[in-house]
Every structure is written in C-alpha cells, then in structure tokens.
Amino acid sequence: MPSLVRVMRVNDFEGELAVRIARRAVEAEVDGKDDHRVDAPASFREKRGAFVTLSTYPDLSLRGCIGFPEPIYSLASAIVQAAHHACHDPRFDDLRPDEVDGIVVEVSILTPPQEVRVRDRRELPQEVVIGRDGLIVEYGPYRGLLLPQVPVEWSWTVEEFLAHTCNKAGLPPDMWLDERTKVYKFEGEIFHELTPRGQVQRKDIAHGSGH
C-alpha cells in the first residue's frame, strides 16, 4: 500500500516536535514527575506506531529502545509512553538522572505493519528493502521486531536482517523459511538529536546517514 506512506508523511517540524516531546518525557520520568501533558498539533492525535531510542553520546551505544509497532495509541501518547518505558528497558539498568545530559533521543514514527505473503518462502527476501523496511517475525507466542535503521547500521543483507529478527524473537535464524512463521514489514520516518538537547535532524537511513 504505497499510498499509506504518502498520506502519513511526517514533516520536519512534526519530527522535531516528536523528539522534543520524547526528550521531555524522558526527563520527567527520570526526575519522578508525573507529567503527561503534551502541547502538539492535531496530527499527533492520529493513531500511529512509534519507538523511542536512547543512545549514549558521543559513542552512540544503545541505552534503551521501546515502542509500539501497531497504531493503537495517538502519536503523542505512543511517544510519551515509549519514552517512559525506554528509561526502564529490561536489557539495561534504569536510566539515572546523572545520565540524562549524556544521551541523545531518537523517535521512529511507523506505518502499520503489513504481512509479507509469498508463494515460495525463499522469495521473501525479494519483498524486503534495506533502508526502507523494518521487520516483525511472529511464530506462536514468539515475536521479534527490528527497526528499519538497524540493518543499515550493521550493514546486513536482507537474509541477515531476517535471521537477526528471528533471533530477536527467540527463534532459530532460518525460521523465516517456515510457512508457519508470519513476517511483517513496516516503514519508518526517523528523527534524532545530533547532540543531547541539540539540533534535531531527519535520519536518511536509505543512504546510511546517522549512527
């Protein structure tokens, strides 16, 4: 559904605002403030999937990444909740107040996931574009997601991207070849701080810019 991406396009002003909202939510969460007020335009009331990624600066090591792939919340609510949860990513210790000045915030705003259907599972890689698509792999209760920027940052092939998404779900790396495994793809527009609380820029992942 190519038209979906055009309809849900995020402009640079909205992208910067999304990052500012996430930054405020992170700081409020770390300071123990219960502040969920968001001053945002009407477009932020639309239901959208969103992820918030926290990285250390300047080495850009992952510090937390949580989000909602499906459009079940308004964009504003999805960003605020994802930002709060990213401070408590179970893979890491909780974000401390003394770390906030040393992280950069990134927001990924997503299109709804669509199942990739092929006659032959070996054709699946032909339906995925590195630098455009994120992936979800689902098999029974097992589910794994990787954002579109991840394979670019790691210079993966499509087959490696599928394998790592299977691993993220706790599945064998070749499980995407099993017809019982569901594979979904989605697109994302990504905006990130260049420095802590600094300039916000759109990340052009198709050309490998950003970290």
Image (tube, rainbow, N blue to C red):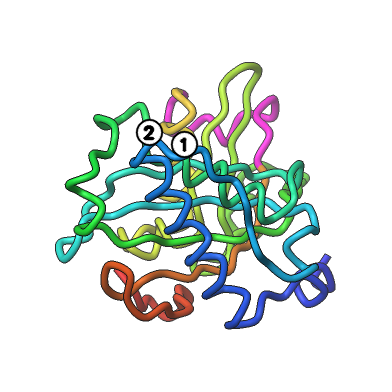
Q: Residues within 10 Å of mark 2 (few under 14, many from 20)?
A: some
Instruction: Please give left or right for residue 107 compared with residue 117 in the image.
Output: left
Q: Is residue 195 magenta?
A: no
Q: Nearer the viewer, residue 200 or 133?
A: 200
The image quadrant of residue 89 is top left
Kind of residue sitting beneath label 2: Asp
Q: Position of residue 159 (x, y in %)?
A: 46, 50
> Magenta region: which residues?
171-183
Question: What is the C-alpha distance between the residues marked 1 and 2?
Answer: 6 Å
Kind of residue sitting beneath label 1: His
Secondary structure, mark 1, is: helix
Q: Nearer the viewer, residue 164 or 42?
A: 42
**Residue pointed to by mark 1:** 85
Establish if 132 lies above or below 72.
below
Q: Nearer the viewer, residue 158 or 103?
A: 103
Q: Residue at x 80, y 68 (%)?
A: 42
**Residue pointed to by mark 2:** 89
Establish if 91 lies above or below 109.
above
